[in-house]
Image (cartoon, grey):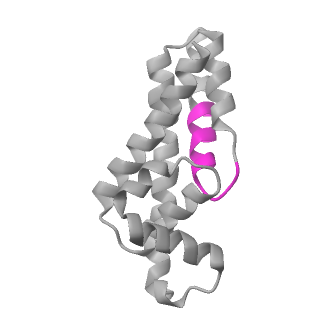
Amino acid sequence: MAFLTGTLALWSLFGSAFVSATLAPGGSEAVLAYLVAQAELSPEVLLLTATSGNTLGAVTTWGLGFFTAVKYPAERLAKPRQQKAVSSVRRWGLPILLLSWLPVVGDGFCFAAGWLRMPFWRSLFAIAIGKALRYAAVVYAFI
């Protein structure tokens, strides 16, 4: 029974982290903090699970940007929020994806990076590093 409970907890954390990284709101930090505080699962496994889900969600947003650029090139942006995210990504390049964990603007950075056709593997690496550092801080705070 403990295996089932642990597996369900990990899938719940993964799902929460995935949704939190897309354009939908979510609270994966709270789920992670709760599971760390329960001390039933390894903090390392929880960190890996949350980071994987959140990174996959961010890469999904990157992909949405990539495929949106086919029909709507970055030069045709209408919304100021989109223009700001794209100009930030153009100015700072891939390192700005280390901040992809930030609420609201982080999703925009991922979308803009895909839209601007930034290299996929380097984008994935920068996103994963930023997400892992954020979740490591949550794990550390609740151990």
Name the image quarter holding the N terminus. Answer: top right
Q: Is residue 84 above or below residue 104?
A: below
Q: Nearer the viewer, residue 114 or 82?
A: 82
Q: Nearer the viewer, residue 22 or 103?
A: 103
Name the side, left or right, on which 50 lies relative to 129.
right
Query: Residue 40 lies in magenta, yes or no?
Result: no
Give percent across and percent down for residue 21: 57, 50
Residue at left 50%, top 52%?
100
Q: Is residue 135 above or below residue 54?
A: above
Any part of residue 132 in sight = yes
**Main secondary structure found in the magenta portion:** helix
Give percent across and percent down for residue 48: 44, 29
- Magenta region, residue range: 12-25
Residue at left 43%, top 55%?
97
Q: Is residue 83 above or below residue 97?
A: below
Any part of residue 73 in sight = no
Name the image quarter holding the C terminus. Answer: top right
Residue at left 60%, top 17%?
36
Q: Is residue 110 above or below residue 112?
A: above
Looking at this view, name the residue that lies furthest to the bottom. Answer: 76
Give percent across and percent down for residue 142: 61, 17
Residue at left 36%, top 73%?
117
